[in-house]
Amino acid sequence: MGIDIEAGGRVKSKARVTSSANPYIRLLCKLYKFLARRTDSKFNKVILKRLNMTRKNKPPLSLQKLAKLMEGKDGKIAVVVGPVTDDKRLYEVPKLSVCALRFTETARASILKAGGECLTFDKLAMRSPLGKGTVLLRGPVKARSAERHFGKAPGVPHSSTAPRVRAKGRKFEKARGKRSSRGYKV
């Protein structure tokens, strides 16, 4: 006797659990698992989900982008589940309250010099357990150099995918289909 399953089968929804051996990350997961369960705040559920993500899905966010996204949001705390990196192109760093998993030394120095503050997630949980007065931000997930090679096959019409080549010289995938002088250009 089998189980009566509707067509298409049943969907097993199992949340991803971090494989990190870092005890601090594991403690944060415990803390936010509790907060996600005991409060009806969507913010805590999202933080828990992001803490359990792979390293690829926790991309770094630069100070330049952070400052741009926090324009006109005075008094709010920027929350990034990932590292915050420094940007040498940003001369005047505004006063910011930032909560992140990690800060590079130079980024931390820049934020503190501007009179801002760098928070950790346990401090954020004490200050804003429901995520009130926060702005949740993410780094660019698709900015990895590997992403250039994903998508429609290179050489196919309307494809901007980079081919995997040894070098970028004239002799490497630069003939028919790549130049008008060599037959046609896609």
Image (cartoon, rainbow, N blue to C red):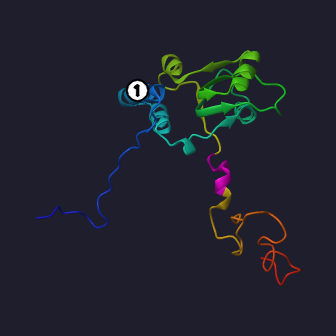
Magenta segment main secondary structure: helix
Q: Which of 55 and 80 is in front in this view?
A: 55
Q: Does the magenta stretch include residue 156?
A: no
Q: In which quarter of the image is the N terminus?
A: bottom left
Residue type (three-letter) at the residue carrying disc 1: Leu
What residue is rendered at 25% in x and 64% in y? 6
Residue 20: where, in percent of width, then height? 46, 36
Q: Relative to the observer, which residue lies in front, 100 or 126?
A: 100
**Residue at 48% from the left image edge and 37% from the top image edge:** 46
Q: Is residue 49 above or below residue 174?
A: above
Residue corresponding to mark 1:
35
Q: What element carries label 1?
A: helix
Is residue 88 toward the left or the right of residue 3 in the image?
A: right
x%, y% of residue 79?
A: 59, 29
Q: 114 left or right of 170?
A: left
Residue 143 colored magenta? Answer: yes
Residue at the limit of the structure toward the left, as seen here: 1
Q: Residue at x 66, y 49 (%)?
A: 144
Q: Quadrant of residue 94?
A: top right
Q: Going by the image, does 15 lie left or right of 159?
A: left
> Which of the image's four quarters has the C terminus?
bottom right
Q: Can residue 95 be seen in this view?
A: no
Residue stretch rendered in magenta on the structure: 141-147
How many residues crowd around disc 1 within 10 Å: few (fewer than 14), some, or many (20 or more)?
Answer: many
- Whole-percent x, y for residue 10 in the image: 29, 58
Question: In this orientation, does residue 171 appear?
Answer: yes
